[in-house]
Amino acid sequence: MRKFQTVLAFALIAVGFVGLCSRRIAAQDAVEGEWRLKLDSGWGEGRFYLELRTENLRGHHTSGSTRDAADFTGLDLDAAAKGGPAHFTWKRDAGTFAFDGRFENGEGSGKFRFVPSQEYIAGMKALGYSGLSLDRLYAFAEFDVSRQFIKELADRGYNGLSTDQLVALRIHGATSEFIRDITAQLGGKPSVDQLVAMRIHGVSPEFVRQMKGLLGKVFTVDELVAFRIHGVNPEFVREVEASLGSKPTADQLVAMRIHGASPEFVKGMRAALGRALSVDELVAFRIHGVSPEFAAEMHRLVSPDLSGDTLVAFRIHGVSPEFVREMKESGYEHIPPEQLIAMRIHGVSAAFVREVRDRGYKNPSIDDLIQLRIHGLSRRASL
């Protein structure tokens, strides 16, 4: 799996206003915009959905997320549900949002104004982040890139991060506690891009611990992310091990998930073939459509000793149960697997057999039929 050089850039699409503006902030600068707030019990007790819209930060920008009422001053959700004027504030380390508007029918809307904190600006300069633009300060406030967060990152060994990296870590919830716990499980320090990728795809410290315990090794971040992307979870691992009777590798687990080689499929194929199967065989079966039903029917019609490779070849070349039955009805009761495949490759069908016989050829063999398809029916050697 490729490394995660592009993950950070992808993640920051969600906050497209950050990063490029070079305008320096002055004491009187502020960001103004519109807000909408939706009250809904589905958000959870004391929570609501807040949407912020601005038009003076590199153009139009809208962002929204669920928030906790306890983080806001002057906001009473019970009172808001009844309707009326709205006046409340939201204080972050980077500055303060002031909201004015009105609540009606379970929703609120109005204007807001964000004013950066001069104390924060000075503190960030001391931490090595000087000359911050207004839009960057707005992003730091919205996603709570606090001075404490930056100090905690430094304590974990993440010094001198870019402002883009700080925002990405905050957006995706890569907290100091997450970094501590995931590092302990991995046995090494992941990069910022890897931290973001793990948060995006749900690689938790508990997930790492469970997979390590089940499979007996420490996996790379790439492998862990691939597990989560493709649905390789502890339950799947346990079921696969029970059905295979062995421990698959990380690549094999992912391949089984990608191609649908489920534990039920493994059990079905083992029952149909009467033997243990490798992961490579199982994946090949899924890729080419060799099902337990197909395998059982072909064993009954052709031979009880068909190999996995032969079953795959049958599927690739279209040797179906229907084809075998048609050839049996045409008088060819026992056709070796390799001849069945050759017949399909060269287009020998039951209809062709009838045509050959109609032309006067008596009792042509399988090899005769194949040669006639290759060279044409005009060839009438001693048949």
Image (cartoon, helix red, strand yellow):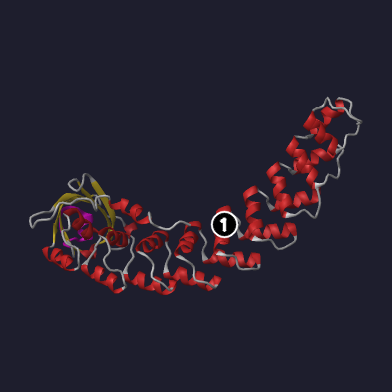
Q: Nearer the viewer, residue 36 or 328?
A: 328
Question: For the image shown, how many numbered marks are present on the structure?
Answer: 1
Q: Is residue 164 left or right of residue 182?
A: left
Q: Is residue 85 left or right of residue 311?
A: left
- Side of 325 where 123 appears, left or right: left
Image position of 104 with respect to 205: above or below: above
Q: Which residue lies at the image location 16% right of the left edge and 68% below the top edge?
A: 126
What secondary structure is marked by label 1?
helix
Q: Is residue 351 visible?
A: no
Q: Quadrant of residue 340?
A: top right
> Where's residue 231, x and y in %?
51, 59
| Residue 304 % position (x, y) | 80, 54
- The residue positioned 74% from the left and 50% from the top of the image is 310
Quadrant of image for the C terminus: top right
- Residue 92 drawn in magenta: no
Can residue 80 be seen? yes
| Residue at the spot of label 1 | 255
Residue shown at 90% from the left, 34% from the top: 363
> In the rendered image of this protein, does residue 246 appear above or below residue 260?
below
Residue type beneath disc 1 = Ala
The residue stretch that appears in magenta: 73-88
Find residue 154 and report its horizontal and vertical position in percent: 27, 71
Occupied quadrant, residue 158: bottom left
Q: Is residue 175 left or right of residue 227?
A: left
Is 85 inside the magenta-drawn segment? yes
Question: Residue 285: x percent and y percent?
Answer: 66, 52
Q: Residues within 10 Å of mark 1 (few under 14, many from 20)?
A: some
